[in-house]
Image: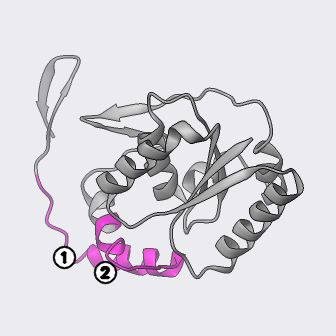
């Protein structure tokens, strides 16, 4: 088996611990692997990952919702399966499964299960899609290289005082609506 490991640069202990565990498992099972470290450029990272996919049978997203979202968008249309080792700040997607770390590790080697994926414009999403205030907070916090769950909460509270709501327009089933 050959793995492409997608990881966001992080100083978090959980990230480093998960990567060390994964490298060790690859060595024990004689799996080849390549580590792709994200740069923060969504489109650039997607393009680079797509170029690498033909060499791998499985992709492991080692991170949180952002890393998972990047991996989903890069893998659309490929034959690679995707696994997740959650070690992000919020881990909203993984929390929905109520699994422990060991369960996620075991799942790396299970038969893949299909799940629904949504699409808005040209981007795919696997968990939720946020607009308005939610998207504003994420954009603001992503300007920091590393952040904690406290940073996320603090930014959310702080931005309540500065956020300027904007009117959105969307099309659903060919019906244009303003929100």
Q: Residue at position x 62%, y 26% from top?
A: 114
- The N terminus lies in which quarter of the figure? top right
Q: Which residue is mark 1?
A: 162
Where is residue 65 shown, x and y percent of the image? 51, 55
Where is residue 3 shown, x and y percent of the image? 66, 48
Question: Disc 2 on helix, strand or loop?
Answer: helix
Point out the stretch of residues depicted in magenta: 138-166
Are the residues tagged 1 and 2 within 8 Å (C-beta)?
A: yes
Q: Is residue 144 magenta?
A: yes
Q: Which mark is residue 64?
A: none
Q: Which residue is mark 2?
A: 158
Q: Is residue 174 magenta?
A: no
- The C terminus lies in which quarter of the figure? top left
Where is residue 50 shown, x and y percent of the image? 43, 42
Query: Is 162 drawn above or below residue 53 in the view shown?
Result: below
- Residue 8 visible in rendering: yes
Q: Nearer the viewer, residue 109 or 169?
A: 109
Give the quadrant of residue 73. Answer: top left
């Amino acid at each position: 088996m050959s793995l492409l490991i997608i990881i966001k640069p992080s100083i978090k202990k959980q990230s480093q611990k998960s990567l060390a565990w994964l490298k060790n498992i690859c060595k024990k099972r004689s799996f080849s692997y390549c580590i792709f470290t994200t740069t923060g450029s969504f489109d650039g990272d997607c393009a680079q990952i797509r170029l690498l996919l033909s060499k791998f049978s499985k992709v492991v997203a080692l991170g949180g919702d952002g890393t998972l979202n990047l991996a989903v968008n890069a893998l659309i249309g490929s034959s690679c399966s995707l696994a997740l080792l959650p070690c992000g700040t919020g881990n909203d997607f993984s929390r929905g499964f109520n699994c422990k770390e060991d369960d996620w590790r075991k799942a790396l080697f299970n038969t893949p299960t299909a799940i629904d994926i949504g699409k808005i414009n040209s981007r795919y999403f696997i968990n939720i899609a946020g607009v308005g205030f939610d998207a504003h907070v994420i954009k603001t916090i992503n300007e920091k290289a590393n952040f904690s769950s406290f940073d996320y909460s603090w930014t959310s509270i702080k931005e309540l005082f500065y956020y300027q709501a904007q009117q959105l327009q969307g099309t659903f089933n060919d019906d244009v609506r303003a929100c």
